[in-house]
Amino acid sequence: MYREMSESTRRELRGKDLRGKDFSNYDLSDADFEGSQCQGCSFRGAMLAWSNMRNANLIDADFEGAFLSEVDFRGAVLDGAKFFDACLLPVYAEPEQFRNSIGLDTASVDIHSPDGN
């Protein structure tokens, strides 16, 4: 069971300084984190389907066990982000963005590049 966050709050995350916040086990479906500072945030076990994380700073964020279907990571910084047991089917990003992430086999992830591939 996911913890609840109001739709209005999910929409007000854009461009915010959220460093170190704990979003573990929240339903963050359709949340807008575009341009947010999310270094070290925990998204463990969270539902992030259809979320916008474009241009977000996600350095050292923890996505262990999170559900990340249709998430837009284009332009996001994912260095040190942890993806153990996370479901990423599909996500929008460049494969190179995951180069310095941890616990993710990019061969098993459905990544759609911005150029449509």
Image (spheres, rainbow, N blue to C red):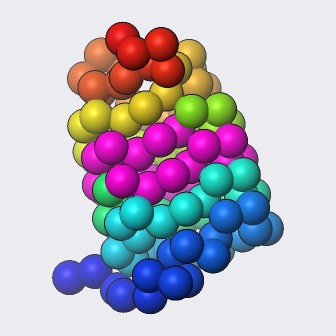
Q: Name the quarter where the C terminus is drawn.
A: top left
Magenta stretch: dominant secondary structure:
loop
Quick check: 9 above or below 15?
below
Q: Where is residue 64 in the image (x, y as percent from the top left)?
A: 39, 54
Residue found at the far left of this picture: 1
Is 2 placed left or right of 4 in the picture?
left
Boundaries of the magenta span: 50-73
Q: Residue at x 29, y 46 (%)?
A: 69
- Residue 17: say if magenta: no
Question: In this orientation, does residue 55 appear?
Answer: yes
**The quadrant where residue 81 appears:** top right
Q: Which residue is drawn at 67% across and 48% down?
A: 56
Residue placed most toward the observer, 107 or 32? 32
Q: Which residue is drawn at 44% across and 88% down?
A: 6
**The quadrant where residue 113 appears:** top left
Q: Name the quarter where the N terminus is drawn.
A: bottom left
Residue placed most toward the observer, 100 or 47? 47
Q: Residue at x 25, y 37 (%)?
A: 89
Q: Where is residue 23 in the image (x, y as percent from the top left)?
A: 50, 74
Question: In this orientation, does residue 95 appear?
Answer: no
| Labels in figure, total | 0
- Residue 65: say if magenta: yes
Is 49 placed left or right of 11 in the picture?
left
Is 7 placed left or right of 77 in the picture?
left
Quick check: 44 above or below 39?
below
Quick check: 83 above or below 39?
above
Residue found at the far right of this picture: 17
Q: Position of residue 46 (x, y in %)?
A: 36, 66
Residue placed most toward the observer, 55 or 67? 55
Q: Position of residue 29 (x, y in %)?
A: 36, 66
Is 37 placed left or right of 61 in the picture?
right
